Image (cartoon, rainbow, N blue to C red):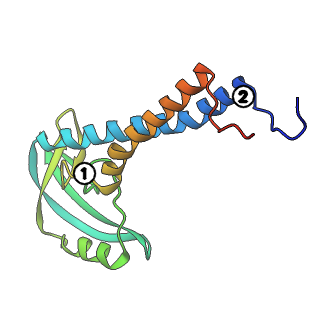
Amino acid sequence: MSAGLPRTPPRSLLLAVWLLLGAPVLYYGAESIQGARDTLDSRHWPHVTGTIVKHETRGRTYCSVPVIHYTYVVRDKAFESSARVPDVEQCFRSEVASRVADSYPPGSSVRVYYDPQSPPNAALLPGYMTRSAWEGLVFFPMFFLGWLYWGSLLLKGCRIAPNVA
């Protein structure tokens, strides 16, 4: 073996790195897809009229979340929630978050969509896909296919880096 040529790492090490890098991507991708499905399913939830209790914003200048507290009644049982979008806290600049929160004045009536299987799970904007949900749906398949391609190269024993002569 020549002293100037770098050694190729063993294939088992490369496969371990491949698995370690792929696991978080697979987890995030599965979560993104499930979240998007749940969000889209919420478009078909029934609705009732609720009442805004209060609104506020939480967070910092570049990541503020409008929090809208509301009450609603389903099958003679009262519930309280603060979800605008199912299972998502959407981040805004502070002035935008304040405007969003102010658009829900306390005491006003609002249409509340609730999960018929679990009425405590409610939202004001059913089916609303946030930017992060769309990013997950768009980028996950690209990362997944690249990860599979890299894995197929490793399993075939192909060199990933070009030979240096």
Residue 73, how many percent across, how many down?
A: 14, 48
Quadrant in which the C terminus appears: top right
**Where 25 falls versus 159 (above or below)?**
below
Q: Earlier in the sequence, mark 2 or mark 1?
A: 2
For label 1, the crowd category at 10 Å Cα-Cα, with few meaning under 14, some 14 to 19 and many 20 or more, is some
Q: In which quarter of the image is residue 49?
A: bottom left
| Viewer-nearest residue: 98 or 128 | 128
| Viewer-nearest residue: 7 or 42 | 7
Name, please, the residue furthest toward the top: 156
Viewer-side label of 2, 1: 2
**Side of 100 where 137 appears, left or right:** right
Q: Is residue 76 in view?
A: no
Residue 80, how many percent across, how many down?
A: 25, 53
Name, please, the residue furthest toward the bottom: 95
Q: In which quarter of the image is residue 33?
A: top left
The residue under the point 65% across, 33% down is 17
Name, please, the residue furthest toward the front: 165
Q: Mark 2 points at which residue?
A: 13
Q: Name the residue under label 1.
A: 129
Residue 162, how many percent across, how many down?
A: 65, 38
Distance (Cα) linking label 2 and label 1: 39 Å
Residue 124, how many percent across, how many down?
A: 19, 55
